[in-house]
Structures are given as C-alpha cells and as structure tokens.
Image (cartoon, rainbow, N blue to C red):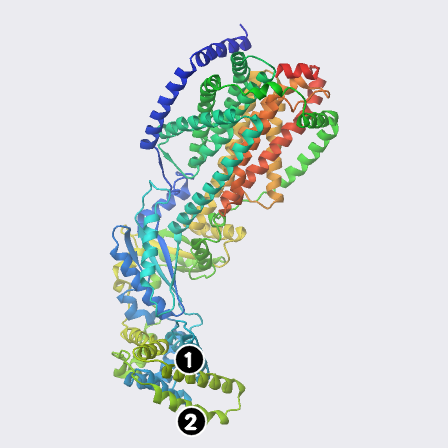
Amino acid sequence: MSLKNRSHAFFSRWGNLTLGKPLVVLSIVTLLSVLALQYTASHLSINTDTAELVAPDAPFQKNRRNYEKAFSQDLHTLLLVVESDTPELTKSATKRLLRLLSANKDCFNSAYIPDDNEFFRQNGLLYLDTDELQSLSNNLSLAQPFIGRIAQEPNLTGFFSIFEDALTSTDKTQVVPVDLTSLIEKVASALHKTLNGENILLSWESLLSDKKTHERNGFIIVAPKFDFSQIRPAENAIDAIRKAVAEIQDPNLPEVKVWVTGEVGLEDDELAGMSTGTFTASIFSIVLVLFILLVAYRSVLLTVATLMTLALGMLFCGAFAAFSVKQLNLISVAFAVSNIGLGVEYAIHFCLRYRDNLIHHIHKSLALRNTLISTAPSLLLCAGTTSIGLYAFIPTDYKGVSELGLLAGTSLFICLLITLIVLPALLKIIPVPAKFQNELGRNGLTRLSEKLSILPLHYAKPISIATFVIAVISIVLAFNVKTDFNPINLRDPNTESVIAFKNLMKDKETTPMTLTVLAKDENRAKTLEQKLSILPTVDKTVSLFGFQPSDQDDKLAVIEEMSLMLGAQMQSFPALKEDTDPVPAINRLIQAIDTILPQKTDAHERMALTNFKKELQDILIELDARQQPNRRMFIEKIQTTLLGTLPNVMNELSAGLNAREVTLNDLPADIKDKWLSKDGSYRIQIFPKKDLNDLKNLEEFITEVQSVAPETTDLPIMYWESMKEVISAFQQAIVIALVTIALLLFAIRRNIADTLLVMTPLILAGLFTMASAVLTNTPINFANIIALPLLLGLGVDNGIHMVEKLHHSLSETQNIYQSSTARAMFYGALTTASSFAGLAFSPHQGIASMGLIITIGIFWIMVCTFVILPALSKLVLKAQGKVTVVDFDSMKERS
C-alpha cells in the first residue's frame, strides 16, 4: 500500500472515531482540559529573573557570578535618586526616607545611603581637593563676621540687621559672606516666591561653597524582597517606597522628588509596561482576529468553534509547559502568542475546506470526513516542518529562546491534535448554516481574485527577474543590519526609571555604565588599578585605596586654621529663635536702602536694591493684613525660607572640623565591605571617558579594559556579551532549521525542485525583512529577534500549501487564490499579523519593534507566497513538464 493510501486509511479510521460519537469525544476532551487547567495552575509559574537567560555557562556569566558572590550587597537592588531645590533639603529628605525604609522589614532586606555615616561626617573635608578646601576656608574667613552675628541673634531681625549694616558699611566683605548684590538678588527672589505661595529654601551650603555643582541629588540603595511568583517581583517593595515618599513630603517645604531606578527599578517598569501594553494590544488583537474569522467564514458558528478549539488547545499547551519547564521566563512566555498565530491557522484551513465542501452540496457527514482526510496530511507536514524550525533553537545557549523552541514546537502538535479531534466533533453537532447552500455563484471578490491570479503567472519572467534584483539589493542591505546591545533603549523612554537612568548616565560621576574588576590581593589590585587608570578610554578608577585621602598633612593644617578662625561659635550653632515682630528691622532696612540707593550708579545694583525694597514692602503689607495666629505662621515661613538651612550647614561644617588623619585601617566596616570582600578580593570600579551609548565607544572601552583585565564584568559587559551570544545562537539555529527543514521536505516529496520552491518564500521573506529593518532603521534587539522562529514557521507552512496547490492549478486560466487552501493561508496570515500588529504601538520599544518586524515579515511572506512563488513555480514546473492544466470548475471540485 502506498504512503498516500495508508494516510487515507489512517485518517479515515480517525474520522470514524471522532465523528462517530462526537458528544463522547467532547466530554472526554472537556474532562481532560479541566484536569490540564488544574495541573497548570498548580505547577506552572513565571520567573521574571533574567540573569540566567543568556549563556548561563559563558565566561562573562561566570565572571558576573564571581562578582555577585564577592559583593552581593550591591546587586539586584533599587537605586533611589532624591531631588529637591536645595542640597540641604535633599540630605534631610534622604535621611528621613532611609529611616522609613529601614524600619520596613517586610519589604526590604536592607537600605543605606552611600558615603553617609559618622566617618564621612567627621572626615569628609579631607576628601575635597586641596584647592577646593582652601577656597572653602577663604569663604568662611569672609563669612566669619556674618556667622558670629547670626549666631548671636538667629532670627529675621538679626538677619535683616546684617543687611542694614552691610549696606551702610564701607567694607561690605566684612559683613556678608558673598557678593552683596548677588545675595540681595537671591533673597529678593526667595521672598517673592514665598509671597506668591511657593515653597522655597535659600541654600546656605551653595552660598558658602565655591563648588560649581552642588549635590542636589541624594542616593539610597535598597535591597528589596522579591516575589518571583508575580509578574512584577518587586511590586510590593516599590509600592512601599511610594508610600514612604508621600510621608516625607512637608507641605511647608518644597516638594521632594524621588526617582526609582537601578537594575530592579528598570525591570519593574519594563514588566509593568509590557503587561499594560500587551493587555491593550491583546484586546485589540482579539477583536481583530474575531472580525477576520467572521469575514473568512461568514459564519458565527464556525468562528465560535474555532475559538473554542483554540482555547482547549491552549489549556493543554499550558499543561505541557508546566510538565516540561515548570517556569516560564520573559522569552518563553511568548509561546502562547506563537500558538495563537499558528494554531488558529490549522482551524482556518479545516473550516474553509469544510465550508467549500458544503457549498458544493456535499452532505455534512461526508463533507467533514473528506475535510479531515484531505487536510490532515498537509497540516501534519506543516506542523512537522514548522516544529523543526522551532526545535532548532533548543540546543542554543540562549535559555529563553531554547525553552521557547521546545514549548512552541511541541505545542504545534498539541494544537493540531486538538484541531483534528475537537473541531470535527464540534462541527458534527453544530447545525449547518443554510446560507452556505447559496454561495456557489461568482461574486465581486471572486472576480477580483481571478484577475489578480493571472498576474504572477502571466508575468512570471519579469517577476522572477525583479525578484532576483531585489534579492541582491536586500543582501547588500542585510549586511548593514544594526544590533542594539543596550536594553535601556528597548524600554519605554517615558518611564521614571529610564529617565532617571539616562540622567545618571549624563554625569561621569554617577553613570551606572561602569566596569568592575576583582583582584585577589593588595599588590595585584594596586598594579592593576595603575594599568587601568592610564588607558585612553578610562576616565578614572575607584578602589579601596582611594579612601585614604591624599595630602592629609596640608589639609589637616587648613582645617585647623578654619577651626581656630571660627572659634567656639562653631561648636554648637544655635537653633533659629522665634521672631515675634521683625517689622522694625524691616523698616530700618528699607530706610537704609532709600539712603544708599541715590548713591548707586551701577544699573545692576540699583535694580537689585529696588526689587529687594519692593519685596520688603510687600512683606510689611502682608504682615499688616494678617491676624494671629496666621501672622506668626507667616513670619515663621519667611524665617524658614531665608535661614532654615543655615543651622544644619553650620553643624555639619562643625563636625567636619574634627577631622583626623585617616588610614585604611580606620575605614568603617560598611565601607570596606563594598570594596574588599570577605575572601580578600579587591574591587576596582572603572569609569568610561566617552559616552557608552555609542556602540563604537562601548566596544573600545570594553576591549581596552579586557586587554588588561580579561575577567572584567558589570553592565556594559553584560549588555555587550549577551547580545553577541544571542546573535550567535540565532545564526546557529537558523542554519540548523533551514538545513533540517530542507532535508525533511526532500525526504517526503522526493523532489529537489519542490523542496527549493517551498524554501524560496521562507528565505526571500527573511531576506526582505532584514532589508526592511535597515530601511526603517529598526535594529535587531533582544525582543524582536524572537520574531524569526515565528516567521520561519509561517513561511514553511505557506510554501508547502502553495506548492501543493500549484501542482494542480498552474494555469493562467485558473484562480489559484480562490481555493480554500489559498484563502486559509491568507486569513491565517491576517490573524497572525493581527496578533502582533497591535504590539507595534506599545510604549515599550522592544515590544513595539517586535510587532513591527513580525508585521513586516508576514507582509513579505504573503508577497513571496502569492506573487513570487507562483511565478517561479510556473517557470520551474513547466520546464520539467510537470504542470497539470485543468479548467477552473475542475479545480474547484478538487478543492
């Protein structure tokens, strides 16, 4: 018995079982689906930890694990960036937030502020540059009279009296610590904003220091507790941070902004965006797929039967996932979307063939049996070839895609099995729509498809030549395909974590894109750091040895001079005192301005004094209009605005005047632990000189550092090496898939020409898709690269169906597009495209690029299948004398 006859006999017996007792079959499948659902719910989980998805045994992953083992406290953490208008408020808000987070043991393992402890508060001045420290000393020398005056009378009256003396004194520098006009402008601006209801603080740290940039940002490193059973493992911790941030806000002070970023923050925002964007796109896709099925079938009943079959198939696929991998990762979870696209195609092929049989007045039972026998072999072949393309990813070193290949490849057979069991049984008990009996006639779409079907056959040679030219151009373009190594560029650029991360990258001092090297002992660490520091791409290196200040004798001498100069008044700067009535002091200050203003010739000075006088007069008006206790509260607010930060600044400075000589042995344990591990490994952090958003700069930086220290690790290495591994894995898998599919096709069809024709739309569509990615400036990244196995499967399916159809219908007088097979391919591609098209509008750049690439790829698959393949087939099959010419009516009977 031939293979064809054996196949016919097998599926005939299959039909007897399925169609003989459809209610029994459906009852058994329903019972099994309930068991599958229970098993899936109890055994399948989602693990969103992405650390081990790419090449877990590669050298760069081993280096990362060694680093994590030695310095685990700095990894898998949230970075909180605290911002406010003044450095003083930033510091106080950061400390308050730290206290709240440290007390929450349910959500956090630990939290700390880098470089903020008793040690740095005492010895912080030693870490300033010598010139910067000397400049601070000079400023304090000029400010000493001011500090003494305000220490004696720490309220608004004392403050305004200093301005009165400064305006009338001949030596202005002996009264106020900075340029008088500049100080007047700052005070006037602060008063103006306060009078207009704004909250503002005058920063005395900025006024007393010559730093070009002041630390407006505070940092807290938080180790959250994760729940990897949730889509967002750090969701509870981040929600707790939001609540704590709300608690530290003071309605009488400027708002404090806290950015949540870092490795964990970025992942959480990404997961949240993926969930929201994917949900919206899924709703859009479901509606669109439903519409396409209704158009394709013109039957609600067939549409419902298809959706029920697909749902049952997904239940059993979920059970297989729970049995085989137990945990889905961020990549393998895409097998569900893959199954929707390819799984529904099987049902479309079956239903359209069944529909055509009914239209040709074939009895319902016979129509179902003929449909099962005629479609099952080709669908089984499609599932086999497609699964090979997906299974080819199993041996790759990209765990996410390896598991995706296993799940998606096996699930194709599960979906096909459910389709061939459930769908015939459902259709057997569903009544036949009467309208199918009246659709044999020719309609507008039929006539249009007839005209279109002539074109690729009539113009076979021109189309083939044009295809060759476009293919050559596409090959050239494909060599220019860009790869995007940086996961930051895949995320929604408008999310809080990404904005904060990119802001940190702009500053060389705060950029997270640094490299890390471990040295086994002190001598090696010093030698290695010296070699690294002189590399052209390295801006600076930081290690434990950098925490021993340089030029300590000179700095300590300057600090001692500052202490003697400021005297006992700095030992304990007094708190601000309540000022019951600053009006007399304000009136005297206005009189002083009126006296000195006519003597001023400089326009800038005159403008500053005039504005200052106006603000003082407005304060008097406001005070006169207010009654107690509002008047007292307004005075307190003005005093806080102008002097609120001064006591803390003075007290911090006072603590710094107690600095002592520092050796490495004097460093506290919490500092040492971040740079010297328990096993004696020294950590060296390497900062880049150039912008690492540029791929060339990144490669150059990594290459130079690795030439000195091959075991370098950290974010740039992880991004760079992971992308190389992913590209290598896909190149390997694509080659394996193409070769294996070609061999299988040849083994089944025993014909080289047919094998090449089936492979043609697949290869051309892949080539054209890569060229389109170049033209649309869409780089290949971690997300959209998983589109390739899906396109591979769809391309093989269509090639098999079309070549089979062309063997029987290759004539310019025949409509190759009106058969149920061609229509099933068309509507199947539409449903697959609609499953992903909505993703192209996702705010998540990686998901959007995946949706775009898949949509473009499906477009090219359809062009190659419906236009290029018929043209090539006519030339090839006619050259071999294998074309069977039949009339159109006969072709429809074959369908």
Observer-nearest of 230 and 776: 230
Q: Earlier in the sequence, mark 2 or mark 1?
A: 2
Whether 337 is drawn above or below 165: the answer is above
Q: Position of residue 406 (x, y in %)?
A: 43, 29
Residue 520 in view of the camera:
no
Q: Position of residue 579 (x, y in %)?
A: 30, 83
Residue type highlighted by circle 2? Thr
Quadrant the C terminus occupies: top right
Residue 581 in view of the camera:
yes
Q: Classify mark 2: helix, strand or loop.
A: loop
Q: Which mark is residue 187?
A: 1
Q: Which residue is mark 2?
A: 170
Residue projecting furthest to the front? 434
Whether 207 is drawn above or below 679: the answer is below
Q: Is residue 352 left or right of residue 496?
A: right
Please tell me whether mark 2 or mark 1 is closer to you in this view: 1
Q: Residues within 10 Å of mark 2 (few under 14, many from 20)?
A: few
Q: Residue at x 53, y 91 (%)?
A: 601
Q: Residues within 10 Å of mark 1 (few under 14, many from 20)?
A: some
